[in-house]
Image: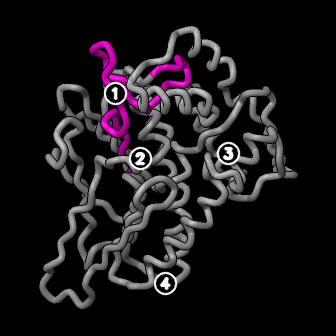
């Protein structure tokens, strides 16, 4: 099931003197609805084509995908795209001190089952799965692009970074085609290219606990934006809320007091990865982390609905 995004586009379609109307198209790709908004009718075909190409690399469940083959065999010579994403993921792993970790697949897959069955795993099962998690188990050879998983049972889930990467690659394709105004939105991971008929694009952030209730708006131009939250996939078990955002350091859903994070950054990949990491890290550590990303800002929401601007 594609996730419900907490961020949506506020479009102004009735501008006086607007020579080209905005077109809005969407398609289900990479496990979410990919939405394209542009005044250029070529944009949708360019974006959807790029997403389909990258889905063949990053799909965790498709036996023909490159990521699936890596997890199954434990070793391969990666495409430039897969190697680039893994190299960047390693950097985020180091910068977040393990709060962002794509080797979380054994845990994320187990928690997907838990969410489906509405029942939390046993502590001893989580402890066992934790033994397969850690980017130190991934070997990357810069010269040959060889990737090896150094521990049997280790596997990679790129769900926290691949959609942002795909958005950036699609935006690059649009720029190559001389398209200067568009939004590409992959389930809440988006990039606002140029402006909207002379004005910044407007994105709205919803209340995590009240669907369609707008908390605030952000004006964006030539930036990536991503929102993550505990509202996307979750269940309540023994009066405790369990979300799909798993802390790789504990093996359990994030419990930092922050229930949603929206990040604005130079690119969609950075915004994508940070929006997940900030929920795991919580308010104080998030403030410290953002200092390492010039131009990035964030809005964090706690359980009371209070917004913290970082």
Q: Position of residue 234 (x, y in %)?
A: 35, 31
Q: Residues within 10 Å of mark 2 (few under 14, many from 20)?
A: many
Q: Which residue is mark 1?
A: 235
- Residue 237 in magenta stretch: yes
How far apart marks 4 and 1 lie (CA) works out to 45 Å
Badge 3 or badge 4: first in the primary sequence: 3
Q: Label 2 near label 4: C-beta < 8 Å?
A: no
Residue drawn at x 32%, y 27% is 258
**186 and 18: which one is in front?**
186
**273 and 241: which one is in front?**
241
Q: Nearer the viewer, mark 3 or mark 4?
A: 3
Q: Give the image quarter of residue 52.
A: bottom right
Q: Which residue is mark 3?
A: 86
Q: Label for residue 296?
A: 2
Q: Nearer the viewer, mark 2 or mark 3?
A: 3
Q: Nearer the viewer, mark 4 or mark 1?
A: 1
Secondary structure, mark 2, is: loop
Q: Is residue 293 left or right of residue 77?
A: left
Badge 2 or badge 3: first in the primary sequence: 3
Q: Which residue is mark 4?
A: 178
Q: Is residue 157 left or right of residue 71?
A: left
Residue drawn at x 69%, y 51% is 63
């Amino acid at each position: 099931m594609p996730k419900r995004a907490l961020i949506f586009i506020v479009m102004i379609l009735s501008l006086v003197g607007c020579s080209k109307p905005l077109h809005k198209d969407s398609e289900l790709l990479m496990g979410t609805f990919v939405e394209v908004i542009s005044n250029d009718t070529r944009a949708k075909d360019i974006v959807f084509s790029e997403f389909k190409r990258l889905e063949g690399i990053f799909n965790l469940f498709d036996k023909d995908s490159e990521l699936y083959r890596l997890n199954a065999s434990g070793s391969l010579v990666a495409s430039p795209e897969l190697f680039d994403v893994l190299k960047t993921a390693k950097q985020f792993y180091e910068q977040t001190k393990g709060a962002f970790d794509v080797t979380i697949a054994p845990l994320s897959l187990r928690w997907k089952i838990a969410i489906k069955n509405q029942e939390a795993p046993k502590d001893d099962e989580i402890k066992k799965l934790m033994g397969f998690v850690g980017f130190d188990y991934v070997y990357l050879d810069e010269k040959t692009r060889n990737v090896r998983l150094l521990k049997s049972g280790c596997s990679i889930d790129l769900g926290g970074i691949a959609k942002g990467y795909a958005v950036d690659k699609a935006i690059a394709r649009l720029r190559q085609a001389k398209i200067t105004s568009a939004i590409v939105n992959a389930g809440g991971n988006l990039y606002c290219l140029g402006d909207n008929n002379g004005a910044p694009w407007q994105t709205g952030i919803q209340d995590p606990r009240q669907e369609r209730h707008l908390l605030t708006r952000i004006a964006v131009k030539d930036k990536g934006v991503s929102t993550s939250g505990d509202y996307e996939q979750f269940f309540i078990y023994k009066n405790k809320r369990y979300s799909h955002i798993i802390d790789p350091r504990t093996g359990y859903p994030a419990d930092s007091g922050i229930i949603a994070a929206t990040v604005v950054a130079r690119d969609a990949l950075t915004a994508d990865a940070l929006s997940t990491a900030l929920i795991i890290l919580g308010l104080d550590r998030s403030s410290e982390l953002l200092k390492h990303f010039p131009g990035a800002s964030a809005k964090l929401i706690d359980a009371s609905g209070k917004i913290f601007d970082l």
